[in-house]
């Protein structure tokens, strides 16, 4: 059974990467989410992380586990925080690149 609200580890991850990523949470049991669930073949029995970059039709990274840990979330986002074709949007991003 899925919780009604996003878990604190997801919120913490979203907050940590707020300058570099837009984060969304989908409760797959919600009838309004069925389009997303079927489009990306998201399993209902495990937590799934989909990471998109330029191509929003297909995820760059798909991680599915019984329980996604903060370490896994941080590792995936750290490794993919820059686009394939970097676009400088601020001095902070320039300094990181």
Image (spheres, rainbow, N blue to C red):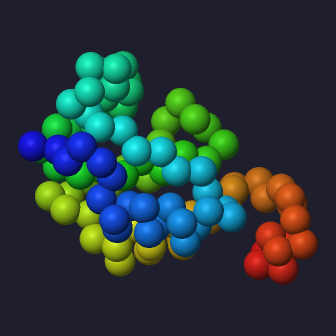
Asked which quadrant contains residue 75, the reply is: bottom left
Picture quarter containing residue 95? bottom right
Residue at 69% x, 56% y: name it: 83
Q: Is residue 87 visible?
A: yes
Q: Position of residue 81 (x, y in %)?
A: 62, 65
Q: Is residue 70 above or below residue 61?
A: below
Image quadrant where one finds the N terminus: top left
- Which residue is drawn at the image coordinates 34% and 20% (left, top)? 32
User: Relative to 20, is 39 above or below?
Assistant: above
Q: Position of residue 47 (x, y in %)?
A: 23, 51
Q: Residue furthest right?
A: 91
Compared across the picture, whether 84 is left or right of 5 comes to right
Q: Is residue 61 left or right of residue 9?
A: right
Q: Nearer the viewer, residue 4 or 1?
A: 4
Q: Position of residue 41 (x, y in %)?
A: 28, 31
Q: Is residue 60 visible?
A: no
Question: Taking 45 as reference, is 36 above or below it?
Answer: above
Looking at the image, which is closer to me, 3 or 97?
3
Give the image quarter of residue 97. Answer: bottom right
| Residue 53, position as x, y percentages in the image | 61, 47
């Amino acid at each position: 059974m899925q919780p009604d609200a996003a878990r604190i580890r997801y919120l913490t991850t979203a907050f940590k990467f707020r300058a570099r990523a837009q984060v969304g949470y989908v409760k797959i049991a919600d009838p309004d989410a069925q389009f997303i669930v079927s489009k990306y073949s998201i399993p209902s029995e495990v937590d799934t992380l989909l990471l998109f970059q330029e191509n929003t039709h297909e995820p760059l990274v798909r991680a599915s586990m019984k329980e996604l840990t903060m370490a896994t979330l941080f590792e995936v986002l750290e490794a993919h925080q820059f686009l394939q074709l970097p676009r400088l949007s601020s001095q902070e991003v320039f300094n990181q690149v």
